[in-house]
Amino acid sequence: MPRDLVLRGVSGEVLIGDGHKTFIIAEIGQNHQGDLLLAKKLVLAAKEAGADCVKFQRTCFPARFTQVAFERPYDNDNSFGRTYGEHRRQLEFSDAEFSILKKYSTSIDMMFTASAMDCRSLEKMAAMNVPFIKLGSGDANNFPLIEKAAKLNIPLVVSTGMQTMETVDKIYNIIRAHHTNFVLMHCVSAYPTPLADANLNLIGVYKERYPSVHIGYSGHELGSIVHLAVAAGAKVIERHITLDKTFKGSDHACSLDCQEFKEMVDEVRRIEVIMGSYKKTILPSELPCRNKLGKSLVAAREMTAGVILTENDILVKISYPIGIPGERIQDLVGLQLTKDYEQDGVLDFKFLQDPSKNLTTEEVL
């Protein structure tokens, strides 16, 4: 079982791991439309919906794109410019704007971070002293970036969409060579993701295959069904949030609106309650039923003091009062009665002794 991952929260440490609440990331991404005021509204909406952290995306264009890719025509309904470069410039915040967003997030007790899309952006995010850095699926096979991020010894959250298991193995081994302060996120990079492609069973596969770290899930399905990933074992959930699904932009349609995001958070918290403990005990809530229907050990026949019990002398029945639990029948075989019993009399350790020691079983146990 992996040890807890410790993040520096605004108001103290936040722990990710068994026994702690699921860490929920509100992916704002570029749903802010390049508008700082809209970005702040999204941060506040995520806070009110119950998210633990807001996440943006950060890119240094020369470090991420070739000039040809940056200048290619980009003519579609979601475009903010004639070329892909113009489109991306409209959606990218400046260093000063990122600082403003972090300060605002901190002021309302909300963790702030961003996906680092290239090595230069990684350096900038590390300099902002964020609690963790996200590496998205688009960079899951960018091993130089992953290696550089691992060497920073900052907690990482790494999505694994569009990759084979062999590539995920490499991601795990690259980072683990430096530390285990990271979360691997099962992810399907389809917007939206068909339910049949969500493959939540992979969360369990990841948990067995990568035992040193915690596993999360970054979902892109329509609706808030992503909470089911918690039942599958995810310790971190990431989901896009928007103020309006009809806004221009490729991520809005498959994002959750504020009400849906809150419903998802509420469902996650309910699942945490119902998943409960790993320890099997008789629960207080079971006692009324146990007191009514629980089986005790009783005399199978009329017996006198001095009889040494065999299995044939003991029956398991519902009795009143409740006596020795039925599962302890073998503990009574070979013990001697110290008083007379009627048929169906409830056996009691006070009136049983070990014949070789002349002590009551109650004194011996």
Image (cartoon, helix red, strand yellow):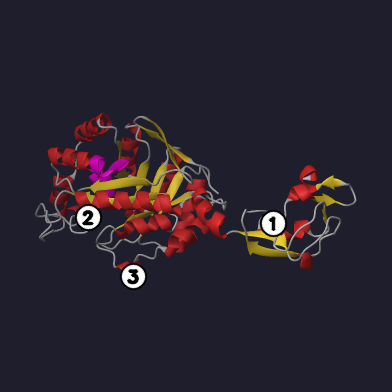
Q: Which residue is mark 3?
A: 196
The spot of residue 18 in percent (x, y) is 49, 46
Q: Is residue 35 above or below residue 342?
A: above
Amino acid type, label 3: Ala
Q: Earlier in the sequence, mark 3 or mark 2?
A: 3
Task: Report the disc number at residue 116.
Answer: none
Is residue 117 something that shows in the picture?
no
Residue 132: horizontal and vertical position, in percent? 38, 39
> In the image as oriented, which residue stretches furthest toward the right?
356
**Element type at marker 2?**
loop
Q: Amino acid at mark 1?
A: Val
Is residue 215 shown in magenta? no
Q: Earlier in the sequence, mark 3 or mark 1?
A: 3
What mark, if any, has residue 255 been given in the picture? Answer: 2
Separation (CA) of disc 2 from disc 1: 63 Å
On screen, residue 52 versus residue 184, left or right, reads left
> In the rendered structure, which amino acid carries the disc numbered 2?
Ser
Disc 3 from disc 2: Cα separation: 18 Å
> Which mark is nearer the camera, 3 or 1?
1
Marks 3/1: CA distance? 56 Å
Residue 103 can be seen in this image? yes
* Residue 168 as seen in the image, left or right of residue 126: right
Q: Circle 1: is it few (<14), some (14-19), or many (20+) Cα within 10 Å?
A: many
Q: Within 10 Å of the Cα at label 2, are there few (<14), some (14-19), or many (20+) other Cα atoms?
A: many
- Seen from the viewer's position, the closer of residues 212 and 300 is 300
Q: Give the residues drawn in magenta, as a range.
A: 46-68
Q: Which mark is residue 346?
A: 1
Q: Which residue is drawn at the image coordinates 34% and 61% (left, top)?
A: 188
